[in-house]
Image: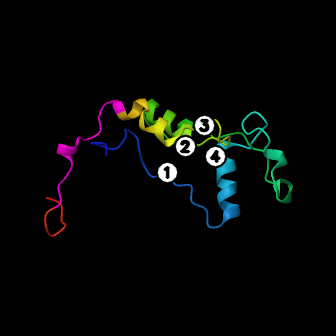
């Protein structure tokens, strides 16, 4: 838990109404996959059943305006087509963003629930 939201963090949603719309949103933001960004993607089952227009990725500065460089790097590390290049949960927990200011709250700084379950 961070003491505050990352600078520039706002509402960033990528929720589609269907699986096809969700895929279109991902493709629009990350760009059409290439052999470089996702080796072997063209040989996946059902790859040729649906086509989307070729698109370049949306610049991260447009997707996450004003977000700190370290936070953007962490987010980009999760959002890669190639799972082999994607950051693991263990690696993410060691990412520099969690150790930059403002630092995450310590256990002592976290709100403590009372007996009735409400936070003090």
Q: Which mark is residue 28?
A: none
Q: CA distance from mark 4 to mark 3?
A: 8 Å
Q: Are marks 4 and 3 in contact (CB under 8 Å)?
A: no
Q: Residue at x 29, y 34 (%)?
A: 102
Of label 2 and label 4, which has the lower sequence position? Answer: 4
Q: Which residue is mark 4?
A: 29
Nearer-N-terminus badge (4/1): 1
> What colour scheme was applied to this rendering of the protein?
rainbow
- 94, 52: nearer the viewer: 94
Q: Is residue 75 left or right of residue 49?
A: left
Residue 83 placement: quadrant: top right
Secondary structure beneath label 4 = helix
Residue to which mark 1 is pinned: 12
CB contact under 8 Å: marks 2 and 4: yes
Q: CA distance from mark 2 to mark 1?
A: 7 Å
C-alpha separation, residue under disc 4 versus residue under disc 1: 12 Å
Q: Are marks 3 and 2 in contact (CB under 8 Å)?
A: yes
Q: Would residue 91 be found to the left or right of residue 80 on screen?
A: left
Q: Is residue 110 found inside the magenta-colored segment of the image? A: yes
User: For mark 3, what is the residue?
Assistant: 59
Numbered badge on residue 63: 2
Instruction: Looking at the image, tell me whether mark 3 or mark 1 is earlier in sequence order.
Output: 1
Assess disc 4: are there few (<14), some (14-19) or many (≥20) residues with their C-alpha within 10 Å of its C-alpha.
some
**Depth check, front residue: 57 or 109:** 109
Determine which quarter of the picture holds residue 117.
bottom left
Region rendered in magenta: 99-113
**Which element carries disc 2, helix, strand or loop?**
helix
In terms of sequence position, does the residue under pointer 4 or pointer 3 come before the other? 4
């Amino acid at each position: 838990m961070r003491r505050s939201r990352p600078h520039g963090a706002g509402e960033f949603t990528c929720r589609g109404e269907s699986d096809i719309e969700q895929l279109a949103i991902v493709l629009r933001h990350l760009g059409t996959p290439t052999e470089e960004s996702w080796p072997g993607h063209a040989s996946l089952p059902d790859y040729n059943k649906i086509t989307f227009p070729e698109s370049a990725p949306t610049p991260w500065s447009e997707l996450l305006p004003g977000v700190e460089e370290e936070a953007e790097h962490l987010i980009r590390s999760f959002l890669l087509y190639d799972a082999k290049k994607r950051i693991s949960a263990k690696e993410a927990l060691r990412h520099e963003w969690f150790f930059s200011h403002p630092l995450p709250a310590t256990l002592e700084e976290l709100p403590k629930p009372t007996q009735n379950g409400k936070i003090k």
